[in-house]
Image: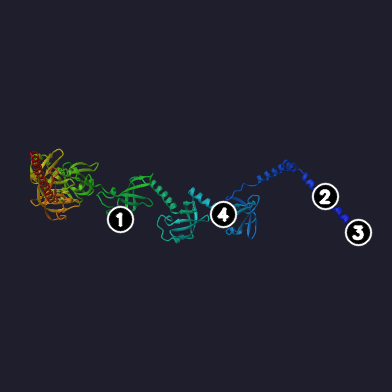
């Protein structure tokens, strides 16, 4: 047993030594192996060959970008996914739920898909619906850019319009764009297919607005152009009054709207179209003008009737007297209707010999009947001008003899202005009195404070200009200027009794008791009484004149000065007496001192 054990030990030790030698040999091989030589060998031979194969393989793969659409072929269809080959190194899977609307998908079908993402493993994540949506959105934009007409299905109505499905995209059709005429019942369009045009796209919100009305308008415009191209000036057509406005009416000529201006409705002047035409009224019209570039037609109604000038009295000529009624007023004059449809101009300069007319309304009003004389008449041009003032002699011919400077007259107040008043001395002779020539003493802010319209007022002629037909009058000059007398009475320092007639923020006005016509001003600081209170309206008091200006007719007075000046004078007298007493006392003292000094010297 012992011999066998020894043999086993020897064998195991020998095998152990052999294994150690083998391990040492392997370690020596690893250490002595030249890796650089091995890698260089690969770079030079194997790696170059590998690059060639990679380049050939890479060229066979398409340049696939995310969020782009590619054509693919269905390679496998299962209950959950559809496998699509787009020519990339790996196929992509799409959930079967994206093909609910397309049940004809089978192996070999060609479809468009979008590469949503390429993950880190090189796998493509595809989408059939996103590709479809992007392609439909591109078609919508293309239709908008090319202004194409497309078909849309009315899916539902909504507030203010309809929901339209176009290329599986929901679009909005406003109610105002359904038809050229207002649509009240939107439900009648639901479930129908309509021709539409994309009019607005919001790229940010993906909102699309479509219109059916623009297609109707386009058809109408084409029909209108075709009809207008056949119209010509002078044609007589039947039409219906479609709309009436203050300046005229629109007439439907059977698809073409034409304008009938108010001035072409009647030869006699009218104020509103309803005096001649009514809505839905069918009449005959004559084509006055056709603008084929702007597709405008102008019609006439009165032109189908004989012109009133043809019935005007043949004997009327320059110098003939005619009567008429004022039909129109303008800044430059008035139009007088001689007979219905025949109007003549009465210019403002021919209304009166007077030059004070600032507007036509100063002389005539609509509806007034006047007798006039014809100044000019042209039957070919159908123009006539009239005059009213030529019916009477020019009163300004002998005006110097009748109204010499300094002469006194009585006139009628006719008109107020900001600078004075107009006085009519006789028909055609009107003079002006400026505000500062109305009164010597009264301060007049507006002429209405002094007189009223149609009052009789005595005046004196101050100036006369026959060429300019201007007559300046005065009223205050009828009496002597009282300020010559006031200068001697209300001199500075004199005291007078007065009554507070009005109070202001800065003082008060006072009327002297001895002459109520004249007023003086008291500053606020000079209204204080002896007891410290302030004079009130209607209170009597004595006032001292502190300022008098004959040129500006201004008198400033003071109540406070009447008693303060007396106190100041009394105080001054007291001070003077004290000074005198002190001075006399000093003199007596000096005399006594002198006498005493002389006595001491004599001793």
- Locate residue 287 relative to residue 392 in the image: left or right: right
- Label 3 crowd bin: few (<14), some (14–19), many (20+), radius 10 Å: few
- Sooner in the amino-acid sequence: mark 1 or mark 4: 4
- The circle on residue 4 is 3
Residue bearing the label numbered 4: 130
Expressed as whole percent of the image width and height from the top left, the position of residue 538 reads 13, 56
- Sooner in the amino-acid sequence: mark 3 or mark 1: 3
Nearer the viewer's eye, disc 4 or disc 3? Answer: 3
Task: Kindly give the residue lying farthest to the top in the view shown.
Answer: 467
- The circle on residue 278 is 1
Expressed as whole percent of the image width and height from the top left, the position of residue 53 reads 70, 44
Q: Name the foreground residue: 358 vs 273.
A: 358
Secondary structure category for the residue under label 3: helix
- Label 4 crowd bin: few (<14), some (14–19), many (20+), radius 10 Å: some
Secondary structure category for the residue under label 1: loop
The image shows a total of numbered marks equal to: 4
Image quarter hosting the N terminus? bottom right
Secondary structure category for the residue under label 2: helix
Expressed as whole percent of the image width and height from the top left, the position of residue 434 reads 15, 44
- Sooner in the amino-acid sequence: mark 4 or mark 3: 3
Nearer the viewer's eye, disc 4 or disc 2? Answer: 2
- Label 1 to label 2, Cα distance in Å? 126 Å
Residue bearing the label numbered 2: 22
Expressed as whole percent of the image width and height from the top left, the position of residue 415 reads 16, 48
């Amino acid at each position: 047993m012992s011999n066998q054990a020894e043999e086993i030990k020897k064998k195991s030790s020998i095998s152990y030594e052999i294994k150690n030698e083998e391990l040492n040999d392997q370690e020596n091989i690893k250490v002595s192996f030249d890796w650089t030589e091995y890698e260089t060998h690969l770079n030079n031979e194997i790696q170059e060959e590998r690059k060639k194969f990679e380049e050939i393989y890479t060229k066979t793969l398409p340049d696939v970008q995310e969020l782009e659409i590619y054509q693919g072929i269905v390679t496998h269809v299962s209950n959950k996914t559809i496998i699509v080959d787009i020519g990339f190194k790996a196929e992509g899977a799409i959930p079967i739920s994206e093909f609910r609307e397309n049940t004809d998908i089978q192996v070999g079908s060609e479809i468009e898909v979008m590469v949503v993402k390429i993950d880190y493993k090189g796998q493509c994540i595809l989408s059939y619906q996103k590709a479809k949506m992007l392609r439909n959105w591109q078609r919508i934009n293309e239709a908008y850019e090319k202004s194409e007409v497309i078909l849309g299905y009315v899916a539902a109505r909504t507030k203010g319009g309809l929901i339209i499905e176009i290329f599986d995209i929901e679009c909005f059709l406003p109610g105002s764009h359904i038809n050229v005429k207002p649509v009240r019942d939107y439900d009648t369009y639901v479930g129908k297919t309509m021709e539409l045009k994309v009019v607005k796209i919001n790229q940010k919100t993906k909102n699309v607005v479509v219109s059916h009305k623009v297609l109707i308008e386009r058809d109408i415009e084409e029909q209108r152009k075709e009809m207008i191209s056949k119209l010509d000036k002078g044609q007589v057509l039947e039409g219906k009054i479609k709309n009436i406005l203050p300046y005229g009416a629109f007439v439907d000529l059977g698809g073409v709207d034409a304008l009938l201006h108010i001035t072409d409705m009647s030869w006699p002047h009218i104020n509103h179209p309803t005096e001649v035409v009514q809505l839905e009224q069918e009449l005959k019209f004559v084509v006055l003008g056709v603008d084929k570039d702007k597709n405008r037609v102008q019609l006439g109604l009165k032109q189908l009737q004989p012109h009133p000038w043809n019935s005007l009295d043949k004997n009327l000529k320059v110098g003939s007297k005619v009567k008429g009624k004022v039909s129109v007023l303008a800044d430059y004059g008035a139009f007088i209707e001689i007979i219905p449809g025949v109007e003549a101009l009465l210019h403002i300069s021919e209304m009166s010999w007077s030059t004070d007319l600032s507007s036509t309304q100063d002389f005539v009003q609509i509806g007034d009947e006047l007798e006039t004389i014809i100044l000019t008449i042209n039957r070919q041009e159908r123009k006539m001008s009239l005059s009213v003032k030529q019916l009477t002699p020019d009163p300004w011919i002998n005006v110097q003899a009748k109204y010499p400077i300094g002469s006194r007259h009585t006139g009628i107040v006719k008109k107020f202005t900001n600078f004075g008043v107009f006085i009519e001395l006789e028909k055609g002779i009107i003079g002006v009195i400026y505000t500062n020539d109305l009164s010597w003493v009264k301060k007049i802010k507006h002429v209405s404070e002094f007189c009223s319209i149609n009052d009789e007022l005595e005046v004196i002629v101050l100036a006369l200009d026959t060429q300019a037909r201007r007559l300046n009058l005065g009223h205050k000059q009828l009496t002597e200027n009282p300020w010559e007398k006031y200068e001697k009475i209300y001199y500075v320092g004199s005291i007078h009794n007065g009554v507070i007639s009005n109070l202001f923020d800065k003082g008060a006005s006072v009327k002297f008791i001895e002459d109520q016509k004249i007023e003086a001003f008291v500053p606020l600081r000079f209204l204080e009484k002896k007891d410290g209170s302030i004079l009130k309206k209607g209170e009597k008091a004595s006032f001292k004149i502190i300022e008098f200006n004959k040129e500006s007719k201004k008198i400033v007075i003071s109540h406070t000065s009447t008693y303060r000046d007396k106190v100041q004078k009394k105080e001054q007298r007291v001070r003077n007496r004290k000074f005198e007493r002190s001075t006399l006392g000093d003199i007596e003292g000096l005399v006594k001192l002198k006498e005493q000094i002389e006595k001491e010297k004599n001793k």
